Image: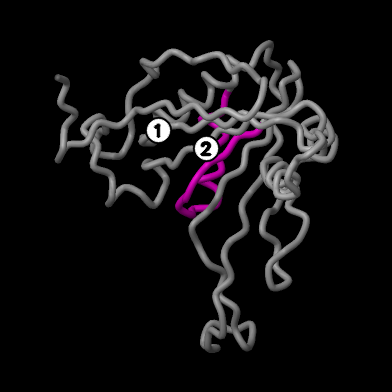
Amino acid sequence: MELLDRIEDQVASTRLPLFAITLAAVPCPDTPIILTLHWHGFIKERLAEVEEAGVVSYTPVPSSALQLNERWRDLVAVDRAAMEAAWELGAWDVQRAERPGCMRPGAESSEALECLQAFGAFPFGINGNNVVVADAPDADELVEVAARRGYLMWMFRPVRGGIWSEYADDATLTDDGRRNGPCPLAPIPPTCDGCRKTVYRFGIPTTNPLIIH
């Protein structure tokens, strides 16, 4: 799964720093995966379409949701792809959330909104502006499956190509905020039997190294 290449292509084309990256998948082999890039940047709203005009407001750049159609057999393959991309982009950790279907009896209404957000299908904008710009033709069908069967979401904050380079206190990083692959950690197979969170820790602090007793 060429996840790292897709991320780097998007960073190169937008020339914007990343705040975070999320990946969402339903527990069904060979279904599309939604990659969402959360940018750190603002669009300047001016009184007129000229450079000299005064800026009246700053609108956050919407996130980019992309559909990945590569085939995969099991969720461990998706897990490994997320870990490899996060490792090489210098993320401190990867957080994987296993979420149950939001159509079950007793589910909170907020779970439906979180499901939509995970797959780049944000149902409304903010102040008339899009929160997500999606290139994901199968997002609605994925949301329907996720609502019934549950879904998984991965999240990490990259140092390379992100806003975190000046805050990174990590002995494992190179000078340009990367790590050389492959990722040394092994994936933990998800159970997909409820609400569960798994954190893969990559970083080692330079100012306060881990002490093993």
Q: Position of residue 15 (x, y in %)?
A: 49, 53
For residue 210, which quarter of the picture?
top left
| Residue where numbered disc 2 is placed | 155
> First in sequence: mark 1 or mark 2?
1
Which quarter of the image is occupied by the C terminus? top left
For residue 78, which quarter of the picture?
top right
Label 2 crowd bin: few (<14), some (14–19), many (20+), radius 10 Å: many
Above or below, 68 against 118 in this view is above
Residue at the (17%, 37%) spot, across then down:
206
Pick whichever, 155 or 85, lies toward us: 155
Give the amino acid type for the residue marked by disc 2 in the picture. Met
For this orientation, the residue located farthest to the front is: 106
Q: Is residue 138 magenta?
A: no
Apparent side of residue 180 relative to residue 59 in the rendered image (left or right): left
Q: Position of residue 157 (x, y in %)?
A: 44, 42
Which quarter of the image is occupied by the N terminus? top right
Residue at the (27%, 33%) spot, across then down:
173
Residue at the (52%, 18%) spot, across then down:
80
Q: Position of residue 134 (x, y in %)?
A: 72, 48
Above or below, 3 against 166 in this view is above
Residues in magenta? 2-24
For numbered disc 2, what is the local secondary structure? strand
Label 1 crowd bin: few (<14), some (14–19), many (20+), radius 10 Å: some
For residue 36, which quarter of the picture?
top right
| Residue where numbered disc 1 is placed | 93
